[in-house]
Amino acid sequence: MTSFIQAAAGKEPCDIFFVNARVFCPFTGEWEDNTSFGVKDGRVAGFGTYAAEQTVDLRGKRVIPGLIDAHVHIESSLLTPSEYARAVIPHGTTTVFADPHEIANVAGTAGLRYMLRERSRIPLDIRLMLPSCVPATPLDRGGAVLSCRDLSAFVGEEGIAGIGEVMNVPGVLAEDPDLLCKIGLSAVVDGHAPLLSGENLCAYIAAGIQSDHECTTAAEAAEKLQRGMYIMLREGSTEKNLGALAAVVTPATAPRCCFATDDRHADMLAADGHIDDCIRRAVAAGIEPETAYRMATLSAAGRFGLNDRGALSPGRRADFCVMDDHGPCTVTDTYIQGVRWTDPGYRRPEILSVPFSCAPLTEESIAIHGAGKARVVGLVPGQILTRELSEEVDGVILPDPSRDLLKLVVCDRYRRGGCGVGIVNGFGIRDGAIAASVAHDSHNLIAVGSDDASIIRAAERVIAADGGMAAVAGNTSAFLPLECGGLMSSLPYDKVAASLQSLEACIRTTGCIENPFMYLSFCALTVIPEIRVTERGVFEVDAFADVPLFSSPKK
């Protein structure tokens, strides 16, 4: 520390001296022109004129602190952590707060250890939030159950930042002892409370939960801000909430608002970017650029109590990105602890293998018996919320592509159990099917299609590979193996992005919606209103119970 203080005072040389920069200060929202600063031991020593071993001329470019993603599931990118880092660092991201509950639901503590090992090998600072809900609800059965005792073994380890999103709202309100024990493990606790309001919201916050990334309207976000929560404006592959929430961001609320990508596939990362994309969308939605920069840096760091980043100021990490003069956020270079990041190239990652134990699908195992008024999962464009629709159907003639009433099948991948079968509207598949081993949060086998033969064909491809994504349309097909827990690919990120495009191109020939695999992955998530399908059958979220497919069966 003594040598660092002496360097800051200009009495000892710095390691690097950066000159001719236009630096954004998130404390004041102002720009400092013609600025120079010294870096010592990976931290900003100070501003002024410093002797240094190396001088870097930033040529008058705009410089902002390294960007921070406040809530993400790396597994949802379909990339291993090392490839995820290669995908996001070029976009200025230097820190992410990642909840690894996807791999934890599949592999338990072995999944958490895998993510910790991977984070130690890469320059991206991945701060892990211990998953509070494995499984998501007491009714769900995935590959593991993590108790408060299981999580307590990780508290205090390098890279652990807090407790991940508390999705079991009924459990909180019922004061479930183990869940309250988990919340008490850390001073930092993320929330997950879609549409929660009024007294129940107050009770949820009183339990110690501090943030929410599930808001879909400005009114919902405003109420949660008023009650003291941090709000994460989310923009993922299907969870497109940023534009609707922009109205709540003001100079007064900006310190309590930050950005999250949550679930963003590799193809969207490659095409649109990461938090830099959130900044551009925020500015397009009417948020001042300087406010957006603050949200992506200091606000996010402040939410997690990190005083060592989020701004270029003495003593903080020298994480920053350089932008060109075109638009609000086009990153040209990213610096991590004062060192310009250069792509190290692909290296094959460690693989966490979790073999499938899934019974083969048959026409009988996915048959719908009966007729009458049925509960139908209605997709909502740009949201992971669903609507419960009611349709008169006859199981014998389902799926019915002419009405866009397709079979939605979820099969136990861990214990060779049975399949739950429901009906979904909104995919638009006329002749084919898609199947995947990514089905939040239990990650059972999930498939949707226009006919039984196509559903079985797509599912068989996933089962044979112990995980992946498959699309079939007539005589054509496409496949992406996800050999790491059935969630992540070992391929380079650009090849994963290309494979996703091939999958979508295959099924789009049948009329399918955009991003079908991301929509599909959420069709089994029992903590998002209104209706889902699990390996047990239809689940009604408000009732928090399994319900019959037919609400009014014909006699």
Image (cartoon, rainbow, N blue to C red):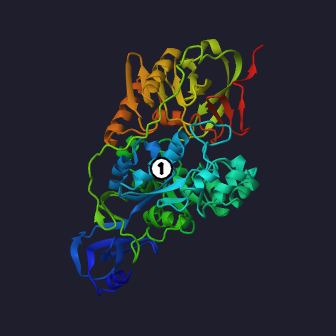
Question: Hey, which residue is sitting farthest right in the picture?
Answer: 555
Residue 223 versus residue 79 in the image, above or below: below
Residue 482 versus residue 30 in the image, above or below: above
What residue is drawn where x is 58% and y is 40%?
144
Q: Position of residue 463 (x, y in %)?
A: 47, 25
Characterize the local packing of mark 1: few (<14), some (14-19) or many (20 or more) Cα atoms within 10 angstroms.
some
> Quick check: 321 left or right of 417?
left
Residue 547 in view in this figure: yes
The picture quadrant where one finds residue 529 is top right
Q: Amino acid at mark 1?
A: Arg
Q: Does dot 1 land on a helix, a strand or a loop?
A: helix
Q: Position of residue 471 (x, y in %)?
A: 43, 25
Residue 164 in view in this figure: no
What residue is drawn where x is 50% and y is 63%?
300
Q: Position of residue 527 (x, y in %)?
A: 64, 42
Residue 158 versus residue 401 in the image, above or below: below
Residue 30 versus residue 547 in the image, above or below: below
The C terminus, quarter of image: top right
What residue is drawn where x is 59% and y is 17%?
365
The N terminus, quarter of image: bottom left
| Nearer to us in this view, 473 or 459 | 459
What residue would you read off at disc 1? 113
